[in-house]
Amino acid sequence: MPSAKSLRVSQRRAVRNKAFRTAAKTRVVAARRAISSGQRQEAEPALARAASALDRAATKGSVHRNTAARRKSRLARQINRLGPASPEAPPGTA
């Protein structure tokens, strides 16, 4: 049985880690939904939010950094399969 203090610390860390993991998972699911809709304009900001949440979870130690990198890479690959972004005005024209 762990000491009372280490038990309290462990429980506090578990709550914090779960919060970071849940936030990252929620954003990843939102990005996957945006990707499955086929709208690159919606998917790219969702990817940015998911990558930010994954990086934050990795920084805090809730998720291993390689796991976060792998998930970000897979999401980016899925977005790249959607094709090029919609044509915009050429640079220099406004």
Image (cartoon, rainbow, N blue to C red):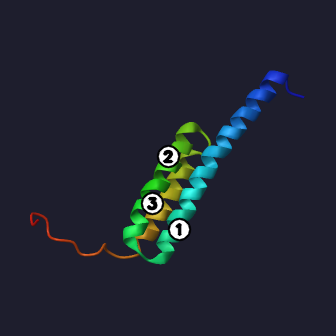
In the image, residue 5 above or below residue 28: above
Q: Residues within 10 Å of mark 3 (few under 14, many from 20)?
A: many
- Label 3 secondary element: helix
In the image, residue 38 above or below residue 11: below
In the image, 72 versus 88, the foreground residue is 88
Q: Which residue is mark 3?
A: 47
Residue found 57% across the figure and 52% down from its top: 24
Q: Earlier in the sequence, mark 1 or mark 2?
A: 1
Q: Is residue 76 left or right of residue 87?
A: right
- For the N terminus, which image quadrant? top right
- Residue 83, disc: none
Residue found 50% across the figure and 52% down from its top: 69
Q: Position of residue 40 (x, y in %)?
A: 38, 71
In the image, residue 67 above or below residue 36: above
Q: Earlier in the sequence, mark 3 or mark 1?
A: 1
In the image, 66 versus 91, the foreground residue is 91
Q: How far is mark 1 from mark 2, CA to CA?
A: 17 Å
Residue found 72% across the figure and 33% down from its top: 12
Q: Which residue is mark 1?
A: 32
Q: Which residue is mark 2?
A: 55
